[in-house]
Image: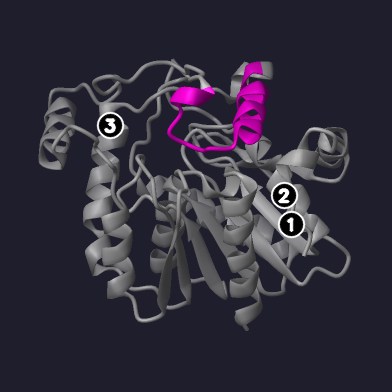
Amino acid sequence: MFYSTEQNLLTQQPEITLFFQQQLHKSQLPTDNGDLYYGYVIPEHAKAAVVICSGRIEGLDKYQELIWELYKNNYAVFIIDHQGQGRSYRVLANPHKGFVNKFSDYADDFALFDRLIVSKLYQGKKIILGHSMGGAIAFDFLTRFEHNYSGVFLSSPMFDIFTKGTPKSLAKLAARIACLFGFNKHYAFGQADYLPIAFTQNDLTSSETRYDLFRQTYQTDSALQLGGVTYGWLNEAFSFMATLEQQQLSIPLFVASAEHDTVVDNQAQLALVHRQSNAILQTFANAKHELLFEQDTIRQAVLSRFYQFCDSLS
C-alpha cells in the first residue's frame, strides 16, 4: 500500500494539485433547494469504490491528499460537499453560519448523490468512509435508505457532541429554547464567523503540516470558509443523536476513535457499537479528532485498518 507522508507532502503538492485539477471530475448535482458540489475519480481497474462523507466545515477541497492516495491504491473515490458547506449551496444570507433545517436533510442529499451519481458510474463493491458529522450522516443514510454498500468505516463519528465545560442537558435545553423563541438562525453562544485558529491552539490534529495546508486552502478561497453553528443546527443535531439508540445497521461497521478527541463524545461511539451486531471499535492512542489528517504514525495506522476492513468485505 502507498501511504502519503508529511515529509513528502509539500514536495508532492504540485502533483496532488495537478491530479485534483485534471483527473478528479467535478460537477454540480441540482436539488430542489440548490446545487450540491461533488467530485469523483475512477481508476481503470478499481478494486472498490470509497464514498467519502465528510465532516462539518469540510469539503472535497480539503480531502485532496486522501483522494489522491486512495486513487494511487486503486480505489475509485466519490465525495460530495454537504449543503451549507464547501462549494455546495448555503441556506442563510451569512454563508459562515452552520445551519440545516432538518438533520435528515444531509442524508437525503447523500441518498440522491448515491442514486444519481455513484450507482450510475460504479457497479462494484462500495464502502462509505465517514468522518465526524459525516459519520452521523452516513449512519442515518444506511439505516433509512435501501442501498448496496458492503460496509462503513467511520472516523471519529459524531454520535454525540463533546460539550466541554457545559453540562450536556443544559446545552440541549439552551438550543431548544433558543429555537422556540425564533433564534434558530442565530449563532449559538460562543460561535462566530470563520476564524483560522493557530496550530498550537487547535483541537483537530497534531500534524502541523496537514493543519497548515488545510488553513492555506481555506485562506486561498474564502468560498470554502464556514464559521460556527447556529442554535438551529445544534438543536437538530441533538434531536437526531437522540434517535440513534433505536437504530441497527445491517452491514459491517468499523469505528475509529481518537483517544484525545475534544470535539465529539467517545462514550457515545462505544455505546452505539455495543448495540450493533457486526461492529468493531478501535481507539487510536494520542490521536486528536481528525484521524485522516493526523501525523503519519496515527494516520497510517488508521488507513492500514481501513484497507484491511475494505479487503474483509465481500
Q: Position of residue 71 (x, y in %)?
A: 79, 56
Q: Quadrant of residue 285?
A: bottom left
Provide the residue designation for mark 3: 232
| Residue kind at label 3, given as amino acid type | Gly
Mark 2 vs 3, N-terminal side: 2
Contact flag, marks 2 and 3 (Cβ < 8 Å) = no
Assess whether residue 139 is covered by the magenta stretch.
no
- Residue 87 visible in the shown view: no
Which quadrant does the C terminus fall into? bottom right
| Disc 2 versus disc 3: nearer the observer | 2
- Amino acid tagged 1: Leu
Residue at the (73%, 46%) spot, across then down: 5
Label 2 neighbourhood size at 10 Å, few (<14), some (14-19), many (20+)? many
How much space separates mark 1 and mark 2, taking CA atoms?
Answer: 5 Å
267 sits to left or right of 53: left
Instruction: Give how far across and how far down residue 213 sits, in percent.
Output: 67, 29
Q: Are marks 1 and 2 in contact (CB under 8 Å)?
A: yes
Residue wearing tag 1: 70
What residue is drawn where x is 59% and y is 60%? Answer: 301
Nearer mark to the viewer, of 3 and 1: 1
Report the magenta residues as a range.
199-219
Residue type at mark 2 is Ile
| Vertical order, 283 against 40 (above or below) | below
Query: Is the Cβ of the residue at disc 3 closer than 8 Å to that at disc 1?
Result: no
Q: Is residue 193 above or below residue 120?
A: above
